[in-house]
Image: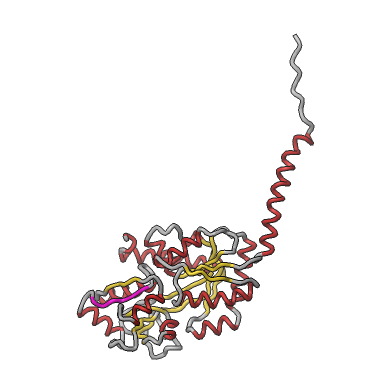
Amino acid sequence: MPFPAPPRRRPRAFRAAPIAFALLALAGLAAPAARAQEDFPARPVTMIVPFGPGGTSDIMARILQKALTDTLGKAVVIENRAGAGGAIGMSELARAPRDGYTVGLSVVGPEAIQPAIRNTGYTPDSFDHICGTYAVPLMMMVPQSSPWHSVRDVVEAARRKPGTLNYGSSGTGTVLHLSMQGLMDLAGASALHVPYKSSGDMVTGLMGGQIDVFNETPTVSRQYKLRPLAVFDDRRLPAYPDVPTATELGYPITSTVWGGLIAPRGVPAAVRAKLEAACDRAVHTQAYQDAAAKLDTPLVYKDGAAFADFVKAEYGRYGALVRKMGLDKQ
C-alpha cells in the first residue's frame, strides 16, 4: 500500500512574505504618525480652562495663551469649560485626543482637590504634566463699602450670628472654599458657603451684596478694587506691605493657587517635548513676566517632571484635608 505523499512545503521566501508585507504595512502606518509628530503643531492648539472668564485662572491662561502662540508658531485658542469646581473641564480634557492639539490649564482645585472629594473620572495620573507656571497666595477681600477692615471683624461677625455671614467660592471643594472654611473652623465660627460656577460670577455676587466676603488672589483684588484684609501665607506680599498675614493675626493658614499646562495622558513623547520646550520659552519671555507681574502673580516655573511630582504631593495633602473636613463623603 503506497504511503501518502508528504505535504509540500512552501519555499522559505514564500513563508516569509506575509510577515514582510505585515511589517511594510506597519511601517506605512507609522510613517504618517512620525511625520505628524515632526510637523507638530500643524494647526491651532486648543487650551481648556476649567473655569469661566474673569477669575485668576482665566486671566493667567490668557497670558500664557499669548506667549505660547508666539513660541509654538500656531494659534492657541482658549475654551472655557466651567462647572463642578473645575471638574467638568478637566474631565473633558482627560477624554480628549492624545495628539497634543488639546491641552489644558491645571489649577489646584480641579486637579488636586476635586478628585479627592468625588468620583470625577480622573486623577492627576490621567494627565501628562507639561510645565508649572505660577503660584500665588490667596487673600481675604471685601467690597470697599464693607464695614469690615480686618479678619477679626469677619470672624467676630460670624461668631455673633452663626450662619448669617455668607462667603463665596468658585465651587465646593475649591481652594477658595477650603481656605475660608478652614479659617472658620480654626476660629470656632460659622458661616454659610455659597458656591458659584466661576470666580467672575462670585465677584458679581459680592458686588451685588449676595455674599459678604471671599478669598481670591491679589489679581482679583486689584482688578475689581476690593479691600484686602489678610494674606493666606507666612509672609506679607511686597505689593501689599500693609496687608497682614492670617498667621500674624492668630490664624496659621497658608493657601496657594498654583497653575500650569497639562495634556491628556499618552501624548507622544516628541510632541510632549515640543510643548514643554514651548512652555519653558513662553513663561521666560519678558512679555509674559511683565504681564504676570502687573497681576502680582510671580513666575514659579517647574518642568514637566517636577510639576508632576508637585501635583502628586498636593493631591495627597488635600486628600487628607478633605477627609478631615468630611468633604469626601459628599
Colouring method of the image: secondary structure
Image-based side of 127 in relation to 5, left or right? left
Residue 146 appears at what percent x and percent y? 30, 87
Give the quarter of the figure containing the C terminus. Answer: bottom left
What's drawn in magenta, residue-wise?
A: 164-169
Magenta stretch, main secondary structure class = strand
Q: Nearer the viewer, residue 264 or 317?
A: 264
Look at 44% across and 84% down and name the residue there: 223
- Which picture quadrant has residue 290? bottom right
Residue furthest bottom as drawn: 242
Look at 35% across and 77% down and name the residue there: 253
Image-based side of 202 in relation to 154, left or right? right
Residue 314 appears at what percent x and percent y? 44, 67
Vertical placement of residue 89 versus 16, above or below: below
Residue 270 appears at what percent x and percent y? 65, 62
Q: Nearer the viewer, residue 39 or 229?
A: 39
Vertical placement of residue 199 versus 149, above or below: above
Q: Is residue 306 visible in the rendered structure shown here?
A: no
Task: State the count of labels.
Answer: 0
Q: Nearer the viewer, residue 112 or 236?
A: 112
Image-based side of 254 in relation to 103, left or right? left
- Which picture quadrant has residue 69? bottom right
Q: Is residue 225 visible in the rendered structure shown here?
A: yes
Q: Is residue 38 magenta?
A: no
Residue furthest front as drawn: 208
Look at 43% across and 68% down and name the residue there: 82
Q: Nearer the viewer, residue 133 or 119?
A: 119
Residue furthest left as drawn: 160
Give the quarter of the figure containing the N terminus. Answer: top right
Residue furthest top as drawn: 1
